[in-house]
Image (cartoon, helix red, strand yellow):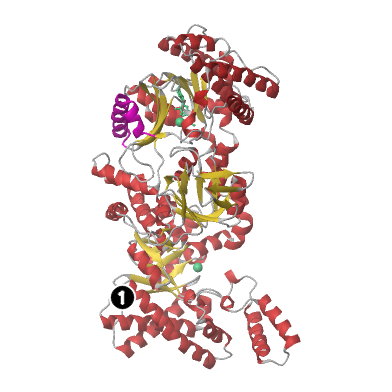
């Protein structure tokens, strides 16, 4: 039985995206609902896989099916591929199930040769158009299919233009193009040692193969990796009869979004070029006109276009990104897809579509990718401060960025990876620059519009981007650009504001972000739906307040070691550590207690009425002492310069202690509750500080709910002993102050043994907080810094691990321990409160896991709280389905 590999547009629907690719499925859908789509057919993604399995060739069967579909296309259009009197011309377009804009290659005007071009000229009575199309075809086909470098053609064309004194292509005449074509063919013959293929059938099959091949070109591979698109899904090929936007001034081509993809505002947004073919708009070669211009120049077409836009939006229930072409005043649709958008736009479009009754709240919540929200929580330029604006371009992707000017994508990548902040400045960008855009803070181009490559890619990544900034004149060779008389060199600092299009000299002043009303609205809906609570990790009142403003419902992790690191306190902390006996230690602890109490009062006040989980001291003590090697150098110096000095004696004492505390493997050494067991007075001081702070605030009438957390417990006995220490401190403070404090004592579950014996540990714990960072370290046996610095990258590249387990929770391994811990803990205490803290608490797939594992809350850094609220709502919705 033969398999169906080829589908006419009228045979497909939008739900066949996996088989037909996004472009093919949507062309079919638009055909189905009666829109003017040039007819054609799609060769399926299965054919792509078959092509690779069959040794990179089409099978007989596939070829036959293509021939049959072609015959049908010829019948529908009344034209024939290669027919001199009435030639059919087609485009051969790639399109995978997941859109990869500009990543793979397309060939237009296929079917032209030395003979059909004459027919086309006669038929259209427009020789200029015919020869222009032919030269475009030779150029594209040679580039995409024959592998001839574009540079040769561009170089030649530039020369011709210059010789003739033209400033732009529309000035070229039919005769000029004929001359160019002769030269183009010579270039091809020289480069590939074969003449340019004249047989249209051969052209077609070569082009189909080339699209399949382009699935594995370098930039497509990089794009897939970046966007986590699987390699095996393959691309479809669309063969579509051509329509022509380059037939004269009553023709043109454009790209439009049904709403503004940068802000989300519900206005048509796009660009249009008169007398041009599709590639001209996206390639950024000419800066196109805004779509409103179409209304002036072709009012009837514009009206029809607007109507169809509304219809497409209603049909797909989402913002559309549409390609269209006008041929002699007739409108054609060439592509529609759900438009890529910034986070800001995603939120606004989702909220407004609910208000307009197009989608419901749950759909709106699923529309916004939590990862994208980071963009909105970035700092932006302070409008009230002075700005040094030197030029203004198109505001192509919002966000503010400051960095050093670089002109080359490779360099941007190099410096970016080395941790430098750079702004990539280019005349225009191409898909080959993508790695540079990834690594840069932002992008500026001097040419190209809002739908140019740079703009689309930057919006997708949430990078600030300014396009078409024509005021800046880039000299790539000299590595500098001019704005009037101002000269900016490679390495100079500039700032850009992608929401206004302003390019500024130097580093602009930035301010903290706030949530827009629509963002608040969406998060309000998320709160109605979600079951997981969202807490924050905050060590200071400032962070706690910020998190509360973002909707945090408590502090899930307040780390006390940060308070110890404060430079004003470090000497006292060191005294405490260096103390030779309990007496001396007590002196230091007594000094630290009021300071800690002060800290806790601040954070309790900021979180009034909400729970605050305080973790007692966790890191190994040597972290508070000077570095061993630094000390050695200092001491050696002093031994020569001041052998009798007090300073030397002190340093030597410090050195002895540092040596004593030095551990082979501090991560698994004397830290966490082990420290508390060896020095119960430290934990006692911290507990007292917490209780005194609580008592003070309660007296003031402030509601506080302290939760005290013991880190790194592996055996129930550890917790049992330290629980007593804390309880004793509590009883003492309550008695002394006469204030009753309700509090809880819990533990971090961050060692496999703790998870495996959680039933026992739960007898001593009021709550569990899974410390998934340490739990990942101890489950994998990886030390995080070593892993991330040395081998994790290789692991991910070789697909040993799918992701960095410190960023995305390893559900199969670490997750199993979490599930076990919750299950066993609740065997002992059915209502045991359990959550996670650490970076995983702000990562969407980990949050989904937490929901499924039955946790009560996630805790994450303040700026991730909004993301976590949304992700928690999505977890509820998705898992209900
Ligand atoms: P990409 O995925 O890079 O956008 P496309 O396959 O959509 O590639 O095509 C590139 C350009 O060529 C687009 O502007 C598109 O509108 C135009 N185009 C594609 N097919 C045709 C056609 N049959 N007639 C006219 N223009 C076309
Ligand atoms: Mg396209
Ligand atoms: Mg830990």
- Label 1: which secondary element: loop
Taking 827 as reference, is 645 left or right?
right
Q: Name the one closer to the observer, 460 or 709.
A: 460
Q: Name the one closer to the observer, 763 or 657.
A: 657
Dot 1 crowding, Cα within 10 Å, few <14, some 14–19, many 20+: many
Check the picture and name the quadrant holding the C terminus: top left
Q: Name the one closer to the observer, 447 or 881.
A: 447
- Asked if residue 656 lies in the magenta stretch, the reply is no
Q: Which residue is most to the right? A: 640
- Does 683 sit above or below residue 296? below
Q: Which residue is mark 1?
A: 704
Percent of width and height locating residue 641: 74, 87
Percent of width and height locating residue 808: 49, 54
Classified by dominant secondary structure, the portion drawn in magenta counts as helix
User: Does any portion of residue 802 appear in the rendered image?
Assistant: no
Q: Name the one closer to the observer, 207 or 57.
A: 207
Taking 454 as reference, is 335 left or right?
left
Q: Residue at x 66, y 17 (%)?
A: 195
Give residue 241's quadrant in the image.
Answer: top left
Q: Magenta residues, as a range?
A: 290-317
Percent of width and height locating residue 474: 56, 44
User: Does any portion of residue 730 appear in the rendered image?
Assistant: yes
Give residue 555's quadrant in the image.
Answer: bottom left
């Amino acid at each position: 039985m033969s398999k169906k590999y080829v589908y006419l547009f009228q045979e497909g629907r939008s739900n066949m995206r996996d088989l037909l690719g996004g472009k093919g499925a949507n062309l079919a859908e638009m055909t189905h609902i009666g829109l003017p789509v040039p007819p054609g057919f799609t060769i399926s993604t299965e054919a792509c896989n078959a092509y690779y399995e069959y040794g990179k060739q089409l099978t007989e069967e596939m070829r036959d099916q293509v021939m049959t579909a072609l015959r049908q296309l010829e019948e529908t259009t009344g034209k024939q591929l290669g027919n001199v009197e009435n030639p059919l011309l087609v485009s051969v377009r790639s399109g995978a199930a997941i859109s990869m804009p500009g990543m793979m290659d397309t060939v237009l005007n296929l079917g032209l040769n030395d003979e059909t071009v004459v027919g086309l000229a006669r038929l259209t009575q427009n020789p200029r158009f015919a020869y222009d199309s032919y030269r475009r075809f030779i150029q594209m086909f040679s580039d995409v299919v024959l592998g001839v470098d574009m540079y040769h053609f561009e170089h030649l064309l530039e020369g011709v233009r210059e010789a003739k004194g033209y400033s732009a292509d529309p000035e070229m005449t039919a005769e000029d193009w004929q001359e160019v074509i002769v030269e183009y063919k010579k270039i091809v013959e020289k480069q590939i040692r074969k003449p340019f293929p004249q047989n249209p059938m051969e052209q077609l099959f070569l082009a189909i193969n080339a699209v399949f091949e382009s699935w594995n070109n370098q930039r497509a591979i990089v794009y897939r990796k970046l966007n986590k698109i699987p390699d095996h899904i393959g691309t479809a090929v669309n063969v579509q009869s051509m329509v022509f936007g380059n037939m004269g001034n009553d023709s043109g081509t454009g790209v439009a979004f049904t709403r503004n993809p940068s802000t989300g505002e519900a206005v048509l947004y796009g660009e249009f070029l008169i007398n041009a073919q599709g590639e001209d708009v996206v390639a950024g070669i000419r800066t196109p006109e805004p779509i409103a211009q179409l209304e002036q120049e072709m009012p009837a077409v514009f009206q029809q276009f607007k109507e169809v836009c509304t219809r497409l939006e209603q049909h797909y229930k989402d913002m559309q990104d549409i390609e269209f072409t006008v041929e002699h005043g007739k409108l054609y649709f060439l592509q529609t897809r759900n438009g890529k958008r910034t986070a800001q736009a995603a939120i606004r479009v989702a909220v407004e579509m609910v208000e307009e009754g197009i989608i419901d709240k749950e759909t709106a919540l699923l529309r916004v990718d939590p990862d994208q929200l980071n963009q909105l929580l970035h700092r932006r330029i302070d409008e009230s401060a002075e700005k040094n604006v030197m030029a203004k371009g198109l505001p192509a992707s919002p966000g503010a960025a400051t960095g050093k000017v670089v002109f080359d994508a490779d360099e941007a990548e190099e410096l970016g990876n080395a941790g430098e902040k750079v702004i990539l400045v280019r005349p225009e960008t191409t898909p080959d620059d993508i790695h540079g855009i990834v690594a840069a803070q932002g992008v500026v181009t001097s040419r190209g519009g809002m739908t140019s490559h740079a703009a689309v890619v930057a919006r997708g990544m949430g990078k600030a981007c300014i396009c078409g900034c024509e005021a800046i004149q880039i000299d790539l060779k000299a590595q500098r650009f001019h704005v009037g008389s101002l000269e900016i060199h490679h390495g100079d600092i500039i700032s850009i504001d992608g929401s206004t299009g302003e390019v500024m000299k130097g580093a602009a002043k930035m301010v903290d972000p706030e949530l827009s009303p629509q963002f608040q609205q969406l998060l309000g809906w998320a709160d109605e739906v979600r079951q997981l609570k969202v807490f924050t990790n905050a060590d200071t009142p400032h962070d706690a307040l910020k998190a509360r403003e973002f909707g945090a419902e408590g502090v899930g992790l307040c780390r006390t070691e940060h308070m110890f690191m404060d430079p004003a306190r470090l000497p006292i902390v060191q005294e405490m550590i260096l103390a030779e006996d309990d007496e001396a230690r007590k002196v230091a602890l007594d000094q630290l207690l009021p300071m800690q109490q002060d800290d806790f009062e601040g954070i309790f006040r900021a979180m009034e009425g909400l729970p605050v989980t305080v973790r007692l001291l966790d890191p190994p003590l040597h972290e508070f002492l000077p570095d061993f090697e630094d000390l050695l150098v200092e001491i050696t110096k002093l031994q020569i310069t001041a052998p009798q000095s007090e300073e030397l004696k002190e340093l030597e004492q410090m050195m002895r202690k540092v040596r004593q505390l030095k551990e082979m493997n501090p991560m698994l050494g004397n830290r966490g509750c082990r420290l508390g067991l060896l020095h119960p007075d430290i934990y006692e001081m911290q507990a007292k500080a917490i209780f005194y702070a609580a008592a003070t605030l309660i007296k003031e009438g402030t509601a506080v709910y302290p939760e005290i957390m013991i880190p790194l417990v592996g055996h129930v006995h550890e917790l049992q002993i330290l629980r007593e220490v804390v309880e004793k401190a509590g009883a003492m403070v309550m008695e002394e102050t006469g204030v009753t404090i309700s509090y809880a004592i819990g533990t971090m579950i961050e060692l496999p043994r703790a998870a495996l014996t959680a039933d026992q540990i739960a007898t001593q714990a009021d709550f569990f907080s899974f410390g998934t960072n340490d739990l990942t370290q101890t489950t994998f046996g990886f030390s995080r810094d070593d892993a991330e610095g040395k081998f994790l990258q290789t692991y991910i590249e070789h697909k040993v691990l799918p992701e960095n387990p410190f960023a995305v929770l390893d559900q199969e391994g670490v997750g199993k321990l979490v599930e076990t811990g919750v299950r066993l803990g609740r065997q002992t205490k059915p209502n045991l409160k359990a959550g996670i803290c650490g970076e995983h608490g702000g990562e969407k797939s980990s949050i989904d896991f937490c929901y499924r594992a039955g946790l009560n809350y996630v805790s994450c850094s303040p700026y991730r709280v909004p993301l976590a609220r949304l992700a928690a709502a999505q977890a509820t919705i998705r898992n209900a389905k």
